[in-house]
Amino acid sequence: METDTIAAIATPMGEGAIGIVRVSGPDAIPIVNKLFRGKDLSRVASHTIHYGHLVDPATGETVEEVLVAVMRAPRTYTREDVVEINCHGGIVTTSRVLQLVLDHGARLAEPGEFTKRAFLNGRIDLAQAEAVIDLIRAKTDRAMAVALQQMEGRLSNLIRRLRRRIVELLAHIEVTIDYPEHDVEEVTRSLLLERCREIGAEIDRLLETARQGKILREGVATAIVGRPNVGKSSLLNALAHEARAIVTDIPGTTRDLIEEQVNVRGIPLRLIDTAGIRDTEDLVERIGVQRAQEVLQTADLVLLVLNHSEPLTATDRQLIDMTRTLNTIVVVNKADLPRRIELDEVRAAFADRPVVLTSMRTEEGLDELEDAIARQFYTGNVPAGDLTYVSNVRHIRLLREARAALNEAIAGVEAGVPVDTVAIDLKRCFDRLGEIIGETASEELIDQIFRQFCLGK
Ligand SMILES: Nc1nc2c(c(=O)[nH]1)N(C=O)[C@@H](CNc1ccc(C(=O)N[C@@H](CCC(=O)O)C(=O)O)cc1)CN2
Ligand SMILES: Nc1nc2c(ncn2[C@@H]2O[C@H](COP(=O)(O)OP(=O)(O)OP(=O)(O)O)[C@@H](O)[C@H]2O)c(=O)[nH]1
Ligand SMILES: [Mg+2]
């Protein structure tokens, strides 16, 4: 428990109707009681609110007309005694009340210090505290719902469950080490493999929600590349399921890039049309290797459009080379016209990627294309309505590290490494997961997280 008492203005600085000065710590009630003319706050019941005036004891001057809420430890936001002074909103009055409280024994709180105390006093864990920031910053209903779930401990409970399972495994390994008969060791190995895979699958599922969450928030950056006239604009209109304005009418942020939002099977795509890749000019010269690479490298998905009714050109082949190692779907358009394209060459270049024949004229192949797009982003193992989405970059990093440690443990078991060595990897996995909820977090990290909060929170 902290021994000092902190205070801060908890409401926005400005023309609010009410301004709240929040005080927390062992002296919260005596400090405010000294300044309060009304009921004796040291005798009132917890979670009650009282009308009165704040008086400066030095001068006897009445400073404010207030309502004071008294909440006694431990059932409070910080788990300490908390007093909230409700002032007439306004910078001057509220600041004056804060100053008075500071003059009589409280210290100005650091940003996030109230929530930090809630964490240090064990009311919430680190992931829950971080969710408070996410909640304040949420910009969509969905983001808010996810943050609220995390604040109530949904993610934390999942992480705790995983850690408990790892502890059980570590206990098993202990037994094996203590009683090193061969059959015990064998049982432990197969059990280890099975459990590690289960835990790994669970971590993968959480990481998958992170990927999908990012997609839902930001959309899939999709680059459409292809020579002129292959049907890029027609493809965009088809994916939008409506005749949009000609894409080239909308200026992009960069001179020859056009961006358009469409929705494919509920997946938001940000289509980026890299118009103007000409046959007659050298591709490299036309848009510059770097620019082309930039667009392609930052894309989550590439739609390479080729013309079914013409043989491949040098530009087509350059584009194939640039996109074959990326997350590309090949759209061989104008399939209603006779085939002149070297389809085998295309299929060979994209051996493990979808190659879809389409006609924007007859809409042939459009369903198949949408399926191919949806398959890239829905693996189907995140149940709809499950709001245990991971979105915090710190959590994602730790989950990845935990997964990597687990992979090493699995590889160790498979390679017949002694189980006490495997235990080291498992322990690392356990620690990384622990960092998410703050069980094994450093003081420095904790400080850094709470500094992101606003004053008074
Ligand atoms: N005036 C005011 N409004 C506020 C807050 C506040 O601190 N003051 N909050 C924050 O900024 C939020 C509410 N969050 C809170 C979360 C937990 C507890 C709390 O006292 N928890 C106790 C259980 C209390 C009970 O069940 O009676 C506990 O968990 O022990 C209070 C507020 C939003 N509105
Ligand atoms: N037969 C046939 N014609 C098509 C098909 N898709 C598009 N076209 C036609 O091909 C022409 C070019 O289509 P666009 O969609 O404008 O092609 P684009 O790739 O956007 O062309 P640029 O903007 O010049 O790069 C238009 O006349 C379309 O009607 C198709 O599947 N079959
Ligand atoms: Mg076009």
Image (cartoon, rainbow, N blue to C red):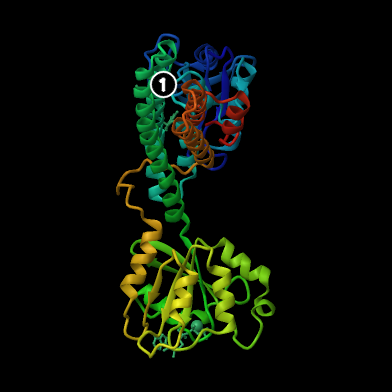
Instruction: Check the image and report above or below for 434 versus 256.
Output: above
For image coordinates 52% across by 63% down, the residue present is: 326
For image coordinates 61% across by 23% down, the residue present is: 443
- Ligand 2 image-quadrant field: bottom left
Choose between 381 and 28: the one closer to the eye: 381
For image coordinates 32% across by 52% down, the residue present is: 380
Q: Give the image quarter of residue 113.
A: top right
- Judging by the rendered image, the residue that carries numbered circle 1 is 167
For image coordinates 47% across by 44% down, the residue present is: 391
Mark 1 nearby-residue class (10 Å; few <14, some 14–19, many ≥20): some
Q: What element carries label 1?
A: helix
Instruction: Check the image and report above or below for 93 versus 322.
Output: above
Instruction: Check the image and report above or below for 299 versus 317.
Output: above
Left or right, residue 379 beside residue 111: left
Residue 157 picture location, percent across and down: 37, 29
Choose between 244 and 288: the one closer to the eye: 288
Residue 270 picture location, percent across and down: 47, 66
Choose between 18 and 223: the one closer to the eye: 223
Residue type indicated by callout 1: Val
